[in-house]
Image: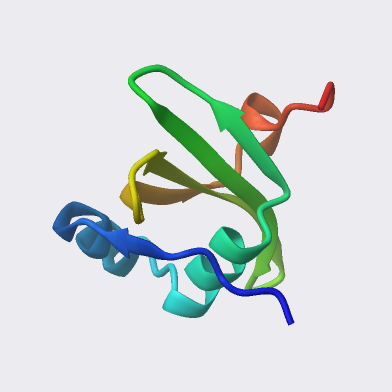
């Protein structure tokens, strides 16, 4: 069995997950098996996966600081999948 990566949520990320109705189960799935991991600036990465919520497709994106443990700085969902999805990966 594959071990889940260790991660923590900042207080800001916890507030955002509540506001945006993102469950801890969704975050666990994203962090355990992201469909894409994109490099950004400032030693951060974007973990993202497409999920169906109430019959509609969304992209869940977590901005993650590359620390030990990984730290989710913020998280959100968007219906603008084409804007963020990298088909060249």
Report x, y in % for residue 75: 38, 50
Residue drawn 74% across and 27% down? 86
Residue 89 appears left or right of 62: right
Please tell me which residue is depicted at 32% across the width and 51% down the height of the picture: 71
- Nearer-the-camera pick, 48 or 71: 71
Answer left or right for 6 relative to 80: left
**In the image as oriented, which residue stretches furthest toward the right?**
88
- Quarter that holds the N terminus: bottom right
Q: Is residue 37 above or below residue 58?
A: above
> Left or right: 30 with respect to 20?
right
Q: Quadrant of the C terminus?
A: top right
Residue 60, percent from left and from top? 55, 52
Residue 78 location in percent, x, y? 53, 45
Work out whether residue 35 or residue 17 is closer to the camera in this orientation and state it.
35
The image shows residue 35, relative to residue 30, as above or below, that is: above
Q: Is residue 37 left or right of residue 45?
A: right
- Which residue is painted at 43% across and 68% down in the image? 22
Residue 52 in the image, given as x and y percentages of width and height: 70, 66
Q: How is the image coloured?
A: rainbow
Instruction: Look at the picture and state if 69 lies above or below 36.
Output: below
Classify residue 80 by image quadrant: top right
Q: Residue 66 occupies which quadrant of the picture?
A: top left
> In the image, what residue occupies the spot 41% across and 40% down?
63
Q: How many marks?
A: 0
């Amino acid at each position: 069995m594959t071990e889940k990566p260790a991660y923590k949520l900042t207080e800001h990320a916890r507030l955002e997950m509540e506001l945006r109705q993102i469950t801890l189960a969704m975050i666990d799935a994203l962090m355990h098996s992201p469909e894409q991991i994109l490099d950004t600036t400032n030693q951060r990465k974007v973990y993202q996966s497409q999920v169906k919520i109430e019959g509609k497709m969304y992209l869940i994106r977590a901005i993650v600081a590359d620390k030990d443990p990984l730290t989710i700085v913020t998280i959100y969902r968007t219906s603008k999948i084409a804007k963020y999805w990298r088909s060249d990966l």
